[in-house]
Image (cartoon, rainbow, N blue to C red):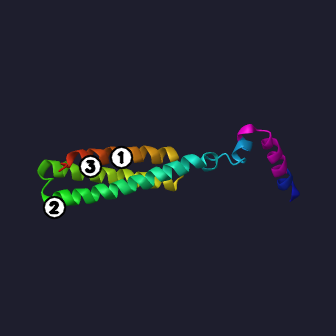
């Protein structure tokens, strides 16, 4: 009965000298290693969500006032949907503590938001 316990202890001691195994137990996860990157990504994500809401309000106002019609309105709606999908992906990456994934998806959303803004006439 004690043999499996002794074997497990011997195996643990043998693996203790292996650098790849010890590094896994030293808190070297992405979240622990780069908390500032995750915090920065979350800030960028929050700002992108605010920009998305703002451009949504601007789109609604431009459409209601007749400033945005036809093909430009359809293109703006498609870009708005694309930005929303990118923010959904960024939220999922944030849930997984994947800072590079958050930043990449936020960049996609920001590109779509900027394209929407360029379609809306400024008066």
Which secondary structure, mark 3? helix
User: Position of 20 compared to 53: left or right?
Assistant: right
Question: Residue 80: percent from the left, percent from the top?
Answer: 28, 52
User: Position of 61 compared to 97: left or right?
Assistant: left
What residue appears at the point 21 percent right and 46 percent down from the top-left corner?
Answer: 119
Q: Does the magenta stretch include residue 10?
A: yes
Q: How far apart are marks 3 and 1 (CA)?
A: 10 Å
Which secondary structure, mark 2? helix
Which quadrant is home to the N terminus?
A: bottom right
Taking depth in this image into account, of 121 and 72 the one nearest to the observer is 121
Dominant secondary structure, magenta: helix
Taking depth in this image into account, of 83 and 117 the one nearest to the observer is 117
Question: Could you tell which of marks 1 and 2 lies nearer the N-terminus?
Answer: 2
What residue appears at the point 84 percent right and 47 percent down from the top-left corner?
Answer: 10
Q: How far apart are marks 1 and 2 (CA)?
A: 24 Å
Q: How far apart are marks 2 and 3 (CA)?
A: 18 Å
Q: Quadrant of residue 64?
A: bottom left
Residue 98 shows up from this direction = no
Residue identified by numbered label 1: 110
Residue identified by numbered label 2: 64
The residues colored magenta run: 7-20
Residue identified by numbered label 3: 79
Question: Residue 53: percent from the left, percent from the top?
Answer: 33, 58
What residue appears at the point 72 percent right and 47 percent down from the top-left corner?
Answer: 26
Q: What is the number of the mark on residue 123?
A: none
Residue 48 shows up from this direction = yes
Question: Residue 48: percent from the left, percent from the top?
Answer: 39, 52
Taking depth in this image into account, of 62 and 73 the one nearest to the observer is 62
Mark 2 and mark 1 in contact (Cβ < 8 Å)?
A: no
Question: Residue 109: percent from the left, percent from the top?
Answer: 36, 48
> Is label 3 or label 1 in front?
1
């Amino acid at each position: 009965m004690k043999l499996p316990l002794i074997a497990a202890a011997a195996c643990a001691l043998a693996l203790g000298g292996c650098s790849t195994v010890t590094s896994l137990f030293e808190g070297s996860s992405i979240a622990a290693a780069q908390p500032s990157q995750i915090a920065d990504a979350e800030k960028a994500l929050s700002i992108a969500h605010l920009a998305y809401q703002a451009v949504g309000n601007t789109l609604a106002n431009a459409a209601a006032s007749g400033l945005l019609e036809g093909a430009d309105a359809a293109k703006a709606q498609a870009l708005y949907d694309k930005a929303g999908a990118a923010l959904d992906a960024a939220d999922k990456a944030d849930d997984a503590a994947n800072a590079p994934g958050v930043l990449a998806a936020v960049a996609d959303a920001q590109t779509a938001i900027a394209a929407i803004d360029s379609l809306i006439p400024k008066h």
